[in-house]
Image (spheres, rainbow, N blue to C red):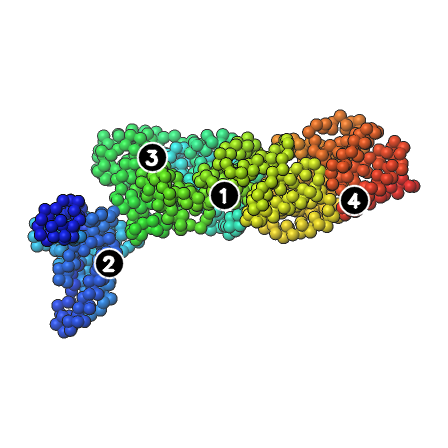
Amino acid sequence: MCPGCSAETTPQDRFCRHCGARLNTVPELRSRKSVVVLFIDLIGSTTLAEWLDPEPLRALMDRYYRVCTEAIGGHGGVIEKFIGDAVMAVFGVPVAHEDDAARAVRAALEVTAGVHELGGGLDVHSGIFSGEVIATALPTGDLRVVGDAVNTAARLQSAAGPGEILIGKSVAQAVRDLMELRPVPPLTLKGKAKPVPAWLVAGQKKTVERDRVPFVGRADELDELGRAFRRVVRDQECRVVTVLGVPGLGKTRLVREFLASVPREEAHVLVGHCQSYGKGITYQPIAELFQGLPASAELARCMAANSGVEELAWVVRRQVEELAAQRPLIVVCEDLHWAEPTLLDLLEGLAADLTGLPVLLICVARPELVEARPGWAAATVMELGPLPPDQLDLFLDQLDTGVLAHSATDALERVAEASGGNPLFAELMMDMLAEGGEDAIPPTVQALLTATIDRLLPGERRVLARASAFGRRFSSEGVAALHDAPEEVPGAILQVRRRRLVERAGPDFRFAQALTREVVYSMSPKAERRDWHLRIADRLDDVHEVAYHLEAACLLAGEVSPGDPGNLPLARRASGHLAEAGTQALARKDLSAAVNLLERALALMPMGEPDHRLLVIRLCDAYVLLSRREDAFALLDRSAAAFADPRGQRTLAIQRQLLALRYGTPGTFTDLEPDADDHLGWCRMQQVHALSWLASGQVGKAEEAMRAAAGHARALGDAYEEKRLLIARCELAQWSPAHLDEGLALCADLAERFAGDRSLLVMVLFTKARLLALRGEIDAAHALLDLADGHAGDLNLHLARIAVTQTRALVTSLAGDHATAARLYGEAARTLVAMGLPTPARTLKVYAARERFHAGTPLAELLPELPAEDLELRADLIATCLRARAGSRRHAEAALALLTDTDDLCLRGEALAEIAHVWKDLGQASEAVELATRAVELYEARGATLQAAQVTAWLESLER
């Protein structure tokens, strides 16, 4: 009906068809719900009005009403009406909040403080009561609330003195953990048949702690941990104990009780926790282990500098050694089933490297750890089972859950049966019973945790749900940033801690069980989770954490709003951060983490994105570094559909050629010409050129190509690729046709540039050592190799250590100690074979044979052992020279023919000198002198003065 002319209207009409009046199409909304009612009345206004002029009085009252409006509105309340100087507000309509009682109390406190600031002797008194009402939202936007709670709140306000806030029982129960309350004698209020319990609000208070649940059973497990520690102390050895068990069986509590039994003066104790969303935060548990210790600063510097895996492992090992040298050390790693493979490798390496030191490493994990890693190194595996019935009964008897629960025998039997001997589950079920939730006992773990969470107050559920978006560990501040009423977060966290869903974790909090977090997270709407992850990502700086949350948001967005155009920029952003995190992992040689991150980035990357090609190439390189050859080729095959354009197809073809060259199966070389502005394509094409030239012995051309590739990487803005190519160019300097002074200058430049990255510096050091040795600086070369070997050993750089050994063999050979050189080459070759690298191993075997020959071993003994097939050019040439030394003119001529295939001046000089010996032995002295003279010229052109001098001395011996 039209309010203007009373004509009939339809629900669809926005204007009256008769008089044209605007119609309010919002119907009245009525609901029965529990609300919190706040009454505030001004004290002193009547006296003030007697002597104050109406105009300043009006201004003062306007400020009073504004204080009330802003405070109540700011805490989510609705002003139902003004009654003279009094204000009636309702909390809980039209939308109920989980902590409407606290909101009402905070609003009353804020109004009280605000009115005191107005001056003029004004004050207020307030009353708050909660209960069921009929709330009506009128079409005009006004609110009407009817019920006993309204009358009782008004009576409490009348009973309150100046500046006081009186609250009823239900409100007190809701806010007692947040507010300082003082009980007052029950109030006899007008219209109430019985005295009304009431409390006076004295202000807000800090949160409090709750006693721990009693520890029951596990005596055998405690004894076993004690015996392991005693053996560690007695034998001065490192020992690993892995405590396994499904969620809730008390693994963490068992270890905590064991630690409590060890006197502080008898052991250092370090504790760290892995996090489920730690797939990209690989080393957070390490940082936690050393938190508060001097080592934490050094670890923080390593992580901030994105140092390599080996550097960090060395720092951890050194700090553990220092602590264990003082007194026995207990290291506890919690939730190790969440650990990245790199962290597990670090721990296994740490346990293997610690000798002669009393260290007990306790690893706490679910059975998934050994399922995913069957070879997990642990001297002792302790798998927890359910508590036996007698111990479970004792556990239930000691739980502080109230007399009501203990008197319900049937309910206790259902708890024992449904919990399956799991102490955590039994504890949560007892909490439900104590709160009168007997009908909510679930038959399974999932049902149990879901029911537990469902029984939380709305505010507790909301806070817990937002906390779950952070992972297992979260901060009160972080959750508050996602909450519409951040001041309520501490109280809600306290409540869920009392239910033992959450526990303290240093300055932060963590879900008591990872499974609890998973259930809470799954119960929240996906759209809300998506928004939470986006808001969290906007607050963070760490690329790995941002990547995790953006990825989660992107996946959820695809599920709740498929086809939404807004998903595309989100996917682009998430993929970019994952790719950046993966590249950082590559740079620090955390290869397993790098592949994981890059694969996830590729899964999110929209088709046709400019960065798609680079991401595929980066992941392909990571597969190669992990020796996952088939995966690398399969990735390129899968990507063909995404790279339908000519530029993309050329990139894939170039990458296939690059893989073929790296794996020693180049096939037919095709020179694919990228577009002039395609820096990625040219960067890869120049690497193909470099490896092709290197395979054919043309090191100088390989250097030029590698230099060009680095330039394109720089133009692309790819710092990781540029750094990698600079190191590759430095390694090529060992065999370059240029004067070795150029190589030394490059080494000096890169040594300064990579001074803070020892994993890269190692390669620079052994290259420089080789070049110095070529010009006779043997002692300086050995000193550099000692330094490089120390770095490689600290960082567990296995291939780098082989390269150092190989270079040391060359330096030793140049110094004339061929027997030692042969031994070093042999050791390096055997290591390469064990690592599955047969081609370079065959080259080193040839080098070892050469050294044995010069040390006096007869050729008749050596030649049968020489590899004959699948040799690199260098090895083929040296092997041919050795066969020629047996007096074979055919092999001598074959060696001279091979010389035309390489521009390595030292290699050519060595071959010429060897064939000169052959011609001498065959009576062709003049030809021998000619070849040796050419060798000297080549050595001198290279700057290899030591070898030039050695061949010159041989020539002089011929003349004599």
Q: Secondary structure at mark 1?
A: loop
Bin the neighbour count of mark 2 within 10 Å (Cα to Cα): few under 14, some 14-19, many 20 and up. many
Report the residue at 47% width, 40% height from top.
Answer: 608
In this rendering, the label closer to the viewer, 3 or 1: 1
Kind of residue at badge 1: Asp
- Marks 2/3 in contact by CB < 8 Å: the verdict is no
Kind of residue at badge 2: Ala
Kind of residue at badge 4: Tyr
Question: Residue 528: image x %, image y %?
Answer: 32, 43
| Cα gap from disc 1 to disc 2, whole angstroms | 50 Å
Q: Quadrant of residue 825?
A: top right
Residue that numbered label 1 is attached to:
611
Report the residue at 34% width, 39% height from top.
Answer: 560
Residue that numbered label 3 is attached to:
423
Which badge, 4 or 3, is on the more N-terminal residue?
3
Residue that numbered label 4 is attached to:
939
